[in-house]
Amino acid sequence: MATLVPTETPVVSGTLPSVVVPASPSAIPVSHQIGIAILVIAFVFGFPGNLFVVWSVLCRVRVRSVTCLLILNLAVADALVLLTAPLFIRYLAGGRGWEFGGTVCKTIHYLCCVNMYASIYLICLMSMDRWLAVTKPFLSQRLRTKKRLLSVMLGIWATAFLLALPMPFYRTVMPYRPGVPVFVCTPYHWDSSTHEIFQYLCETLLGFLLPFTFILFCYISVICRLRSTMFQRKGRGNFLILLIIAAFIVFWLPYHLINILQVSNTHCMMPLTLPLSELS
């Protein structure tokens, strides 16, 4: 994802360092402090919470429904990516750049990308399941078998691991600037705009636009169906559906908007790596 960097550029041109190394450990930028706070909250509350969901479904629920299995997979995906939070916290707070080597740099970004695809496509599956249950209940009963569900979820995980493969190739560890023994884990596309556009467009199309269109279609159809029936809690159901769509937009749209800006910037030959002094 594209970021704005300071006037000191890295030793390799065309790269986008994902962290600004402070002059001293105590001089942590405000943006890093906000990032650290978000990561700490997410790890402290999110990781135990997802483990609790996994434990509850596996150990406490005797008859696991289709919904339970979908929630279990979402919890596993979220717990997997939250395991990387301590490394990013150290990266932002340590003031020493990336200290964990190139393999870990590539691996944790790969896991984050796998989580992105797996979570979105699992939400698509949940949306389709709800759409079938509301609009085609008899077909839904025939299709909602655990054997079919396990096959679909296995396909989703395999697709997520496959679609995330470009991520390790477009991440590397390099010196922050010449003469300074500090390294950053940063995007790198071999100074090729083609590679850069390929990565960001694939992530945006396959990881947001297409899944979001599918989710939107499912829930609009559900809302129309609910409005045509006489449910006493129709308003509450509509609210929950809109909340799901809003959450999807809030959590994923900013990331993909930056991807789109990066692609547009690359296409127009106007690099985003401008000195901060020129932006004020």
Image (tube, grey):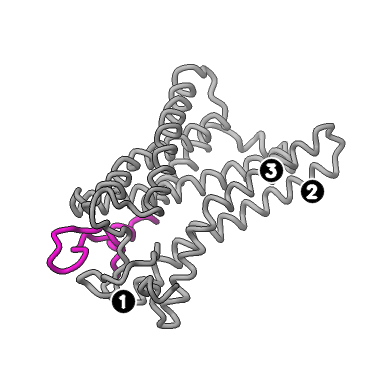
> Residue, x 85% and y 44% (percent of image)?
228
Check disc 1 and report the residue beneath it.
Answer: 192
The quadrant of the picture occupied by the C terminus is bottom left
- As drawn, the label of residue 224 is 2
Check disc 3 and report the residue beneath it.
Answer: 241
* Residue bounds of the magenta highlight: 163-189
Q: Amino acid at mark 3?
A: Ile
Q: Quadrant of residue 240?
A: top right
- Residue 160 in the image: above or below residue 153: below
Q: Earlier in the sequence, mark 1 or mark 3?
A: 1
- Residue 263 in the image: above or below residue 3: below
Classify residue 262 as left or right of residue 111. Answer: right
Residue 214, given in percent of the width and then of the height, sits at 61, 54
Residue 181, given in percent of the width and then of the height, sits at 13, 59
Q: Quadrant of residue 191?
A: bottom left
Q: Nearer the viewer, mark 2 or mark 3?
A: 3
